[in-house]
Image (cartoon, grey):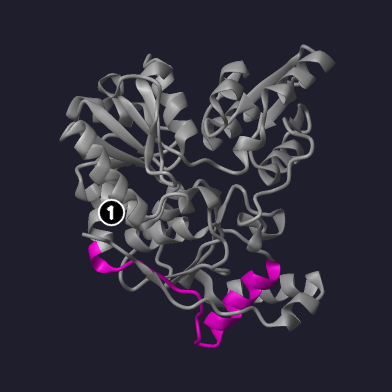
Amino acid sequence: MTLLQSYKKNAVLPSEYYQLPEQEMRDRIKKIKEKMGESLYIPGHHYQKDEVIDFSDDAGDSLQLAQLSAKTKAEYIVFCGVHFMAETADMLSSPDQTVILPDLRAGCSMADMADIYQTERAWSKLTEFFGNSILPLTYVNSTADIKAFCGMNGGATVTSSNAEKMLKWAFSEKERILFLPDQHLGRNTAYNMGIPLEEMAVWNPQTEELETEQPIENIKVILWKGHCSVHEKFTVEHIRSFRLRDDNWNIIVHPECTHDVVTASDFSGSTHYIIETLKAAEKGSKWAVGTEMNLVNRLSSQYPDIDVQSLNPNMCPCLTMNRIDLPHLLWSLENIENGNPQNIITVNGETKSFALMALNRMLQRA
């Protein structure tokens, strides 16, 4: 069965919004927020620009924000993140809540690397190879369709914080795991659990081939060939550069980074882990951080008593995340105020039902 959820057609931001002075946009947003009160909730992902975070009711990770959204009394949830995050918010919220993404172009390249058609074809071929020995897991950074596929096939979602716990559960259910869509989080997590790299293979959805030099009966973890375009830009050479400059640098990276980068670093963990580690860091300590630039810059400002720099000095912010800006936020709020909300995110009933199975299997164990 193919599961496809749908969006309303992306409405285009009128050009005049780009001509507005920043202070005027801020004043208009503030006025609408004050007028709407509890009927409006604006969650902002950690990777958003400061100008957006300034108006967010909460800042956090994707699942955390979706859960917070569902707990509010808000009629409108204007999700400042990317579309898979807004999908999750829609699935967890009540029917009388409306989830809006200010710009539908705010997608996620990682999530887009695994679509439902590719996944169903892969599943068919992999089950020919391995029979009924595979359980699918998907990172929450995936589309509602992929979450639903995992739910339908007995699998679950994972976050970067609980991935190891969920892999342990999956191995108690089946002999093998198909891990979607980020190969690096899957590889790093499985390796930390003691699974050798030789027992992992990569499924290439473009060639529809299993990439491995090992006998397939030895394979325990099948990694989808996807990645985060931001975190893959950190390299071992960046780490060497910091260490050569001063061996007092602490290197901390997200587990979406490549295996060699994670292995060469001092610390690795989720966005929450990175934030909490720097929050508790010793005064005067030095930290090279391998994650999204907006967050790194914010941490540098928040903790002036420590030296916080990006591990990649030439890194750009996440381009799709940064499509959400003051003009789009203001436009979204004024559309709501005028009774004509745009870019409503709606996950269809069947997809939602199976996707929630995958989410709930995780939430029951995490």
**Outermost residue to the left:** 132
Please state the horizontal and vertical placement of residue 96, each as a whole percent of the image: 33, 73
Regarding residue 150, the answer to whether it shows in the image is: yes
Regarding residue 281, the answer to whether it shows in the image is: no
Q: Nearer the viewer, residue 219 or 296?
A: 219
**Outermost residue to the top:** 247
Q: Is residue 351 left or right of residue 344?
A: left
Q: Nearer the viewer, residue 161 or 138?
A: 138
Secondary structure beneath label 1: helix
Please state the horizontal and vertical placement of residue 57, each as a whole percent of the image: 56, 58
Write the residue at 58% across / 76% down: 333
Residue neighbourhood size for the residue with mark 1, other residues' Cα within 10 Å, grouped as few (<14), some (14–19), many (≥20): many
Please state the extent of the stretch shown in magenta in the rendering: 326-350
Write the residue at 78% across / 33% down: 304
Write the residue at 66% across / 57% down: 322
- In the image, is residue 86 part of the stretch drawn in magenta? no
Question: Image quarter for residue 263?
Answer: top right
- In the image, is residue 330 part of the stretch drawn in magenta? yes
Residue denoted by label 1: 148
Please state the horizontal and vertical placement of residue 38, each as a whole percent of the image: 48, 69
Residue type of the residue flagged with mark 1: Ala
Q: Nearer the viewer, residue 53 or 209?
A: 209
Tell me: residue 151, above or below residue 11. above
Q: Quadrant of the C terminus?
A: top left
Please state the horizontal and vertical placement of residue 103, each as a whole percent of the image: 58, 69
